[in-house]
Image (tube, rainbow, N blue to C red):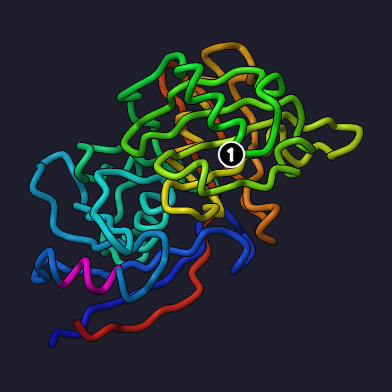
Amino acid sequence: MTIFPFQQVDVFSSEPMRGNPLAVVVGADSLDDAQMQAFANWTNLSETTFLLQPTSPEAHYRLRIFTPTQELPFAGHPTLGSAHVWLSQAANAPQGEIVQECGAGLVRIRRDGSRLAFAAPPLKRSGPVDPVLIERIAKGINLPTSMIQASNWVENGPDWIGVLLPTRADVLSVKPDYSVLAGTRVGLVGPFDPRLDGEGAQFEVRAFTRNGYEDPVTGSLNAGLAQWLIGSGVAPDRYIAAQGTVLGRAGRVHVDKIGDDIWVGGEVTTCIRGTVDL
């Protein structure tokens, strides 16, 4: 067995244990696919990542991302959490953008004060959702179809379907039936009412995975939602999304459109530092 540096971080929250956790193994080039998958299965977190030497001359590091059951080409909170860990280990961190190499290609990451942000990757699929599927989603979230104000494919790796509800309260009230939603990734979004909800964020987001659980705070979904909502005029070029409220989390996702790029960012907090034997 080999000893590797290891960190567990909390992403999209400045408060420990209020965001989305991520396990990161540093310098994992000697591990094979089976070892990576086995460790990700053992951590039982939504994602576990492995920092490797890059193969592209443009990248600062290479990242592999695993759920307990499969490898992903890209995911948002693993990208920010892994960049945070890489920066903590880097002897000569760049002053400008950081470039991550992963299964989806090269991802640009920038520092925004105390936050990190990634450039939203292009949507692999967008556009209207089949009405039959929308009817099933409405049944799965126990709401009449008439309450779905708009929907859109927002696939950027994970095949998310974005669903716009009238208000934040409507989003928070949903009790999903995963037996109906099985096999779909559904992201709900609803606007804040400043008089009732305050001005700490402008949208509430919830993410129901295809594996029957709610994700606390989801970078890939928020990236896709931002491209849809800003592009359709529903959201301004700069806003904050809250996520994880129902789960007792306090995730905050900062979205900022600069030129042609949409940046998705948040705070990252280190909770565990040490080593792991693999």
Identify the element where label 1 is drawn.
helix
Q: Position of residue 80 (x, y in %)?
A: 41, 51
Which corner quadrant of the image does residue 166 belong to? top right
Give the magenta-colored segment's residue range: 35-40
Residue in front for this viewpoint, 265 or 204: 204
**Residue type pointed to by label 1:** Gly
Looking at the image, residue 123 sits to the left or right of residue 36; the answer is right
Q: Residue furthest right?
A: 195
Q: Which residue is mark 1?
A: 140
Residue 36: in magenta span? yes
User: Which percent across, then down, holds residue 271?
Assistant: 50, 74
The number of numbered badges drawn on the structure is 1
Which quarter of the rendering shows the N terminus? bottom left
Give the quadrant of the C terminus: bottom left
Name the residue at the top extreme: 232
Q: Percent from the top left, x then y, of residue 63?
A: 23, 54
> Is 196 left, or right, of 82 in this rendering?
right
Q: Is residue 111 magenta?
A: no
Residue 209's place in the image compared with 19, above or below, is above
Whether 215 is drawn above or below 6: the answer is above
Circle 1 crowding by C-alpha within 10 Å: few under 14, some 14–19, many from 20? some
Q: In the rendered view, does 260 fall on the left or right side of 265?
A: left
**Going 21% across and 49% down the picture, which residue do you hit?**
60
Residue 110 image offset from top left, x and y in percent: 40, 41
* Towards the viewer: 191 or 27: 191
Q: Residue at x 22, y 55 (%)?
A: 64
Q: Is residue 4 left or right of residue 33?
A: right
What residue is shown at x 41% (from left), y 79% (from top)? 273
Residue 86, compared with residue 177, is above or below; it is below
